[in-house]
Each structure stands twice: as C-alpha cells, then as structure tokens.
Image (cartoon, grey):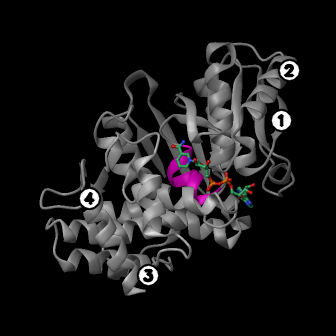
Amino acid sequence: MKVTVGLADRSYDVVLANGARHDLAALINERAPRATTAALVTSQGLSEQDWFDLQSGLVQHVVTVPDGEAGKSWESLGALLEQLADLELSRDDIVVGVGGGAVTDLAGFAAAVYLRGIALVNVPTTLVGQVDAAIGGKTAVNLDAGKNLAGAFHQPLGVLCDFETLATLPERERLGGLGEVAKCWLLEGGFAAELAAVSLHDLIVMSVSLKASIVAADEREGGRRALLNYGHTLAHALEKVALARSADELRHGEAVAVGLAFAARLALALGRVDATEVARHDEVLDALGLRRALPARCPTTSILDAMAHDKKAHHDLTFVLAGAEGFEVVRGVEPRVVADVLESFRGEQ
Ligand SMILES: NC(=O)c1ccc[n+]([C@@H]2O[C@H](COP(=O)([O-])OP(=O)(O)OC[C@H]3O[C@@H](n4cnc5c(N)ncnc54)[C@H](O)[C@@H]3O)[C@@H](O)[C@H]2O)c1
C-alpha cells in the first residue's frame, strides 16, 4: 500500500506494509542515486530490536541519540550534527530516522540544517510516528520554554511504515497512538459501529491518507493543516499542567483523546452541533479503548492559564471545532465558556 504526499517536485510516497523497511535500499537508490553513505539515526534500545536489520545499500553507520523526549534538545542536536560531520556525510548523502516521533523529529531537524539540508528518509516505528510525526515535514527540538519551539520544515524523500516494527511497541505507546487515530476517524466523520470491520492497519492507512491530503493542500499550516490540531488545544494545556509534575504522567495521545471529547462538548455549548456529535465522539473513543475523563489534579484555572500562555497559540483561545460546515478553526472562544464546559465535563466523571 502506498500513499503519496503530493508536493509537486518534492512529492514522496509513504509505503505501508509488513516488511516495508526492506524497501530502504531501493528507495534510496531511486530517490538519492548519488548517495554513498547513510546515517541511521535511532536510540540504543531500538538499535537492539530484532527488526533493526535495515540495509541502505550504502556504507551505513548507526548513530544513537537519547531515547524519547530527552533526545529532542539542542545538546542532542549539536552532538548529532558533530557525528554527521565526523562521518563525513556529504550533501549527496542521507539521514535515515528510525524510531518514534522523538527520533524522527530530531533526525529530520539535523537533516534540515546539516550542510544547509541533506536528504532524509523516515522509518517510523511507533503508531504516532506512522500516522503522524514522520509525515509532513515538520521537525523540531524542545526549548525550556516549551515543546517543539525550534525546528524546520524538511520533507523526507520517502517514509517506510513497517507494521512489523509495531509488534514490540509497549501497550501505552500503542494507546497513545490511537488518540491520533481517533482524531483522524472523527475528522473523517467515522462512527464507532464501523470500527468493528476495520483493522489497525486499515486505521493507519486512513490516518496517513488524511494527513497526506491535508499536507499536500497546506504544507506550512496556513489554513487546512491546522485541522490536524483537533483536540490539541486542551491536550497541550493538560500536558503542560501534568508534565510539570512528572514526565511520565500523561502521554500526548492520552491527552488528545480527552481533548477530542472536550471539543465536542465545547461545540455543543456554542450551538455548533447537537448531542449526537458528542455521542459519536464518546462512542469512538470508547470503542478504541481510550480514556476520555479529565486527568486528576488538573484544575480549570491551571488549564485556562496554560491555554492562555501557549506560545504557539494566537493570543486568544483557538479551537478546532465541529459545526454545520464541517470542522473549522474557531478563534476567540470566551474563556468563561471554556471554563464552564470544563467544569460540566469534570462533573460528568
Ligand atoms: N513532526 C510532527 O509532525 C509530529 C507529529 C506528532 C508528534 N510529534 C512528536 O513525536 C513525539 C512523540 O512520538 P512518539 O509517541 O512516537 O514517542 P517517542 O518517539 O518518544 O517513542 C516512545 C517510546 O517508544 C519507544 N519505541 C519506539 N518504537 C518502538 C518499537 N517499535 N518497539 C518498542 N519501543 C519503541 C521509544 O524508544 C520510546 O521510548 C513528540 O516529541 C511529538 O512532539 C511530531
């Protein structure tokens, strides 16, 4: 199965299959025929997995970076760039990001800035990576002031989503990924009853197709791409409140699931949808096994404060919301309404 991200002369395919990783050499040969060296960027733990048997067809080096969010720092970026230079990668050579969104965000940023930009291929190995992070060209590291505040757009030459790599994914990471899948299913108007006939692989393909079509229409998030932030206004605020306490308290996808349930309630309160839309959201989240209750110890005032100080927001409360015309970005939502809906949402639990 292939999904094309249509970006004129920078178009590329996302290959989705068991064993897709074995296409790496052919992909590089076709898209970067002058490359002689590949740097496979990954974490130590992932490099020890049985499925880490990638063959680029070139002189290849495995370069390890710290696992997870710890890798998305200036220090890791600098160390990675120094290693690429030590390996004498040239402008014709290639970086291959192998891992979850943290690895592909870091590897992609390094590829974007090393020698002012060299080729990149992503081999995402988490559900979040396959349905979201590895596709679309956004790369980033975190700053002390917040997540993903420094980065670059740098599209890969191709993305290999190998379902076999997901076999070793911890359950919590799988559930986190399902939060983003639920977002896509809801944006596509799907119902819970239809999920019974759909496999996880089908859901990945559906999510990738949606993301590819949105990125092709709006690469730099001037308009439609913002729809992919559905559920994320509350999710980012919850992450900010919860992660200030502990790095492991809340996974991004878990926060997105709560954000989706909340967004449906906010749309209802604003008279944009009726109660059937709230029920559709709840049923889809339940069917995917996602919790939709507000996490403990996230008071409404702290959530509103986090939303108001979101560095990537537009200085007012902005949500993607369902409505008569479909989903759209709604700016300037009254904080009082958000607070009321949060309180009644909390009261449901
Ligand atoms: N660039 C984008 O468009 C975009 C989109 C969404 C998310 N992101 C970023 O992605 C990151 C989150 O990505 P994530 O959820 O993949 O988390 P992650 O990359 O931190 O991976 C989570 C954990 O799973 C492990 N892991 C990865 N693949 C595995 C496998 N196959 N088997 C066993 N363990 C495996 C990792 O080593 C890590 O410990 C965040 O930093 C987020 O900002 C970026």
**Label 3 sits on what residue type?**
Ala
Badge 2: residue crowd in 10 Å (few <14, some 14–19, many ≥20) = some
Mark 3 and mark 2: Cα distance apart in space: 48 Å
Q: Secondary structure at mark 1?
A: strand
- Residue identified by numbered label 2: 87
Position in image of residue 6 (x %, y %): 38, 34
Q: Nearer the viewer, mark 4 or mark 3?
A: 4
Q: Which mark is residue 63?
A: 1
Q: Nearer the viewer, residue 82 or 321?
A: 321
Number of numbered labels in the structure image: 4
Type of amino acid at the residue the image marks with label 2: Leu
First in sequence: mark 4 or mark 3?
Answer: 3
Check residue 281 in the rendering and tell me which mark sits there, or answer none. none
Q: Residue at x 51, y 54 (%)?
A: 131
Q: CA distance from mark 1 to mark 2?
A: 10 Å
Residue 287, labelled with which disc?
Answer: 3
Res. 74 image quadrant: top right
- Whether 80 is drawn above or below 129: the answer is above
Q: Which residues are magenta?
A: 126-134
Tell me how far mark 4 sits from mark 2, CA to CA.
48 Å
Cα gap from disc 4 to disc 3, whole angstroms: 21 Å
Question: Would you say the magenta stretch is mainly helix, strand or loop?
Answer: helix
